Amino acid sequence: MRKNIIIILAVVFALIFVRMISNNISKSSSAKQRKMMGVPSVTVDTVRTQSVRREFDAPARVMAKYRVDVLARINGYLTKSYFKEGDFVKAGQLLFEIEPQEYSNAAGLAKGNLDNARAQQDYYNKQLARYKELVENDFVSRSDYDNVLAQKNAYTAQVQSMENAYRDAQRNLSYTHVKSPVDGRVGIIDVTVGNYVSPNSGPLTTINSSDPMYITFPLESKDYAELNRIDGSPNVKRDVEFTFSSGQKYEYKGVQDFYDNRVDESTGTITLRATFPNPNSVLLQGDFGRVKIYSNNNDEMPVVPQSATMENQEGLYVYVMDNENNPRLTYIKTMGQSGTDWIVYDGVKAGDVIITTGMQKVIPGNPVRVVKEAVKDTPEKTNKSSLFSRILNKIKKIFRGNK
């Protein structure tokens, strides 16, 4: 009996001792927990790369392939107009008539002069043939033959001069019918019927070709260098997409087929040009918008999960872990998305470690606790209960053994 009492007392003292140690451990753990409560728990991941087709954005302007000012090439009154403003015309189609009577008369007079000179030339050609035979038989003097030869040469030269004058008169007569030099759409009529016009009157109207159309755009020199690096040469044709200033995307793609031979010193850009089909005449001369030009080859680009990004007034940003394992706020520039990832062209690079969850409580420069999964509460109370249960079970076994 005394032995059992000693055992019971020893167990009680042991329980008291364990209780004291447990309380101390609990206090220490609670202090650590209180200290860690201000440090947010986060998960991190390493930025990887993905092979993507690069795209570059730039402001753009629509230009007609041909833009022709229709001018009067002679003086006279504008008598007729054969089209309506905004009509589509074909090359060679009649647009205006300038009073033709004066030029028709001049052409007729030139034709009469030419016919007269040709008749005289024909007469002296025949005379020369006769005098050649006569002079050989000494029926006429050599000087008479030379006179006929001189007359024949004079009328030959006169015929050439009259032919030129007649052709010039015909040319001026043709200018009385003003025709379209290209296919395209006619603009506003600047000089109406009844006005006296001349080569100095300025354009009668303007014609812009409509299909295809040019779109020019200034690309930053560094972006142009990137394109050439990716594609391996500047002399390649690249796909281009155009978006109107309203935000509507043009239905047809164009091809970049020209680049300027210099960089603009004031803007640091190089002018490129793309040719677009325009069968429905949707693209108009002088319109503005934006283009996206695509590389022919793929490039390795950093990608980050969209869930790892946040946004403020300055743009998208992520938290990058620095050399001391503290978060640093870093803004990124994206060029689209691939699945659930942003494709990044500026801000982060492959190998950077970024925070992927728990960003809401992160303060740049302040420490964070990196975990692999969500943090769970430590079951200390359960552990304590298990310890006391084991000791009590041992006491119960002692009492059962005495019985």
Image: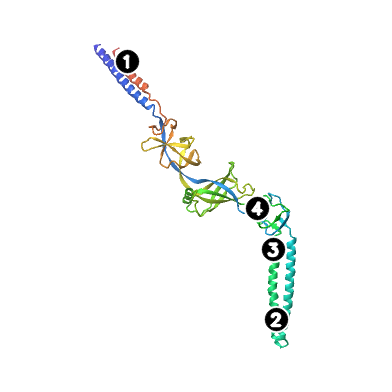
Q: Which residue is mark 4?
A: 207
Sequence-first tag of 4 and 3: 3
Q: Which residue is mark 2?
A: 147
Q: Secondary structure at mark 4?
A: strand
Distance, label 4 to label 3, CA atoms, is 23 Å
Q: Which residue is mark 1?
A: 396
In the image, what residue type sits under mark 4?
Answer: Ile
What is the residue that sits farthest to the top in this orientation?
Answer: 1
Regarding residue 149, the answer to whether it shows in the image is: yes
**Relative to 148, does residue 6 appear above or below in the rendering?**
above
Mark 3 vs mark 2: give the one in front: 2
Mark 4 vs mark 2: give the one in front: 2
Sequence-first tag of 4 and 1: 4
Check disc 2: other Cα within 10 Å, few if <14, some if 14-19, many if 20+: few
Q: Indicate the quadrant containing the C terminus: top left, top right, bottom left or bottom right.
A: top left
Distance, label 4 to label 2, CA atoms, is 58 Å
What is the residue that sits farthest to the left in this orientation?
Answer: 2
Sequence-first tag of 2 and 1: 2
Horizontal arrangement in the rendering, residue 389 relative to residue 203 (left or right): left
The answer to which quarter of the image holds residue 200 is bottom right
Q: Name the spot of residue 256 as percent of width and height, x first.
A: 54, 51
Mark 4 vs mark 3: give the one in front: 3
Distance, label 3 to label 1, CA atoms, is 131 Å
Q: Which residue is mark 3?
A: 171
In the image, what residue type sits under mark 1?
Answer: Lys
Sequence-first tag of 3 and 1: 3
Q: Name the spot of residue 358 as percent of width and height, x first.
A: 43, 31
Q: Secondary structure at mark 2?
A: helix
Distance, label 2 to label 1, CA atoms, is 162 Å
